[in-house]
Image: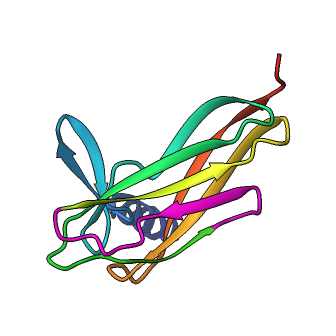
Amino acid sequence: MKAIKISMLALTLGLMSFTGTPVKNDGAVKVAVAGGIVWKSESIDVGQIPQGTPKTIEYEFKNNTDKAVLITNVKPACGCTAADYTKEPIAPGKTGYVKATYNAAAVGAFTKSVTVTTNAEETPKTLTFKGTVVEKA
């Protein structure tokens, strides 16, 4: 009986959605998150980067709320990544960006993140990027 209860609980949790709602737009699936901000991509694979060559990754989002959205903080997870972002309020229906520039100093695979806080969401959004730094030829 206990095994059945555990199985039912696992099934119920598995069927629940803990992420954003997929939104189809221009043939591409985008992820809508709480607050009405739609990120074009939340995770980017940059592939191979030559060692010592900084790589800039741009995350774009659209404000689908009925009020201006302001990015209040952008925090890279480590000192090897610098961040830039749209400083002015993003009007409803307009787009903004967050850029992460990775200093590709160490050879090997990497996964990095940038945490973004806005006035439209209670929970900060974590954006990720990954790739491999290869030795210059």
Given the current orientation, which residue lies at the most extreme front position?
A: 88
Residue with the most extreme top position: 137
Assess whether residue 69 is covered by the magenta stretch: no
Question: In which quadrant of the rendered view does residue 53 lie?
Answer: top right
Observer-nearest of 51 and 125: 51
Residue in the image at 19% along x and 34% along y = 27
Residue 84 lies in the magenta-colored region: yes
Looking at the image, residue 45 lies above or below residue 134: below
The tally of labels here is 0
* Residue 7 image position (x, y, % from top left): 45, 61
Secondary structure mostly seen in the magenta stretch: loop
Question: Closest to the observer: 49 or 20?
Answer: 49
Q: In the image, is residue 77 above or below residue 30?
A: below
Residue at image position (58%, 54%) is: 100
The stretch of residues the image draws in magenta is: 76-93
Horizontal arrangement in the rendering, residue 109 relative to residue 40 (left or right) = right
Residue 109 quadrant? top right
Q: Position of residue 14 (x, y in %)?
A: 40, 59
Q: Which percent across, then down, holds residue 70?
A: 35, 77
Q: Position of residue 6 (x, y in %)?
A: 49, 67
Colour mode? rainbow
The residue positioned 19% from the left and 66% from the top of the image is 64
Q: Residue placed at 74% from the left, 63% from the top? A: 78
Q: The C terminus is located in which quarter?
A: top right
